[in-house]
Image (tube, helix red, strand yellow):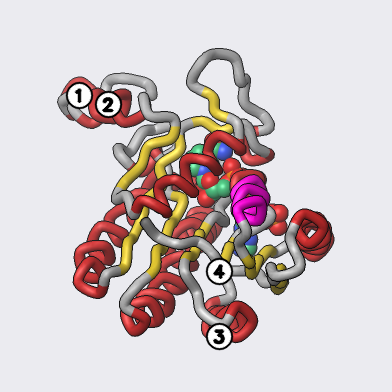
Amino acid sequence: MNSLKRVILFGATSAIAEQTARQLVAQGASLYCVGRNPDKLTALIDDLKVRAGSQQCIDGCVADLVDHSRHEHLINDATHVLGEVDGVLIAHGTLPVQQACEADVAMTRKEIETNALSVISLLTLLANLFEQQQRGVIAVISSVAGDRGRQSNYVYGAAKGMLTLFLQGLRNRLAKANVDVVTIKPGFVDTPMTADFNKAGPLWAKPDQVAKGIIKAMQRGKDEVYILWFWRWIMLFIRHIPESFFKRMTL
Ligand SMILES: NC(=O)c1ccc[n+]([C@@H]2O[C@H](COP(=O)([O-])OP(=O)(O)OC[C@H]3O[C@@H](n4cnc5c(N)ncnc54)[C@H](OP(=O)(O)O)[C@@H]3O)[C@@H](O)[C@H]2O)c1
């Protein structure tokens, strides 16, 4: 079991990360929270401080994570504040309108930058830190959208698929250093990211359910985790639809 006493959260103000932060604090963790929106980050840190005990440290920093030049400083500051790091969760992301990306190269590149390259930059630095420590757990929120390209969201899906593949290789490398790398693949989650979606039906999860699954997966050092569980079987089916048939479907 991995201890989660000192954890860094990137994209800490996301609905899923916020719930994860609350649950971690309830379990006695100290947290370093990185978020882009200063007001939301201050509100989150204030709330967590109220929930935390006197031994727990709650701190953080505002950062736009597409700015790669800040990553090293953020990690150094977090390590300085927490002392040592048991775990990291990378949660930031954006869900673009697919048709808008199709009409705009710059937007497509920006989405790949936010959802994949900024995360890969953080992971490259974090991997070296954790490899040196010879322990700990790195978790990243990817998506079921990365399991197969679909016409309705293949820009987002391609970015998440890049992450999933990167994490597979990183897991393979860091296993030798006693470090777990966890890929979180949520299905549909009721958060601000999906505010415009119709949320009827049993496929939707709440952020606190996903948070619980993330913490369990990090503690147990899982590899790839689908939340909710049935998405594994849905995506297994979708991945196995023959391409000749799949390209005629509208998914
Ligand atoms: N909701 C779903 O159905 C679903 C499904 C699968 C995977 N996911 C993934 O789950 C993760 C969390 O999303 P969520 O559902 O909790 O949505 P959310 O509440 O909208 O959170 C997204 C977060 O990402 C942050 N962010 C975006 N770009 C950033 C940047 N350049 N630098 C720093 N922070 C940035 C946003 O910050 P601001 O507040 O400043 O905008 C926001 O806090 C994302 O990686 C998402 O792709 C979500």
Residue drawn at (63%, 67%) of the image = 30
Asked if residue 205 is among those painted magenta in the image, a careful observer would answer no
Looking at numbered disc 2 in the image, what kind of residue is underneath it? Ile
Q: Alpha-carbon neighbours of circle 3 within 10 Å: few (<14), some, or many (≥20)?
A: few
Would you place residue 167 above or below residue 223 in this image?
A: below
Would you place residue 28 above or below residue 228 in this image?
A: below
Q: Does ligand 1 reach within 8 Å of label 3's beta carbon?
A: no
Q: Which of 108/141 is in front?
A: 141
The residue beneath circle 1 is: 241
Q: Alpha-carbon neighbours of circle 2 within 10 Å: few (<14), some, or many (≥20)?
A: some
The residue beneath circle 3 is: 76
Looking at numbered disc 1 in the image, what kind of residue is underneath it? Ile
Which is the main secondary structure of the residues drawn in magenta? helix
The residue beneath circle 4 is: 6
Q: Which residues are magenta?
A: 17-27
Task: Answer with left or right where residue 51 lies relative to residue 220.
Answer: right
Q: Nearer the viewer, mark 4 or mark 1?
A: 4
**Percent of width and height locating residue 179:** 31, 68
Asked whether the residues under the numbered discs 1 and 2 touch, taking CB atoms below 8 Å apart as contact, a structural biologist would say yes
Q: What distance separates the C-alpha of mark 4 from that of mark 2?
A: 38 Å
Mark carried by residue 238: 2
Asked whether the residues under the numbered discs 3 and 1 touch, taking CB atoms below 8 Å apart as contact, a structural biologist would say no
Q: What distance separates the C-alpha of mark 4 from that of mark 3?
A: 14 Å
Quadrant of residue 197 within the rendered picture: top right
Q: Alpha-carbon neighbours of circle 1 within 10 Å: few (<14), some, or many (≥20)?
A: few
Looking at numbered disc 3 in the image, what kind of residue is underneath it? Asn
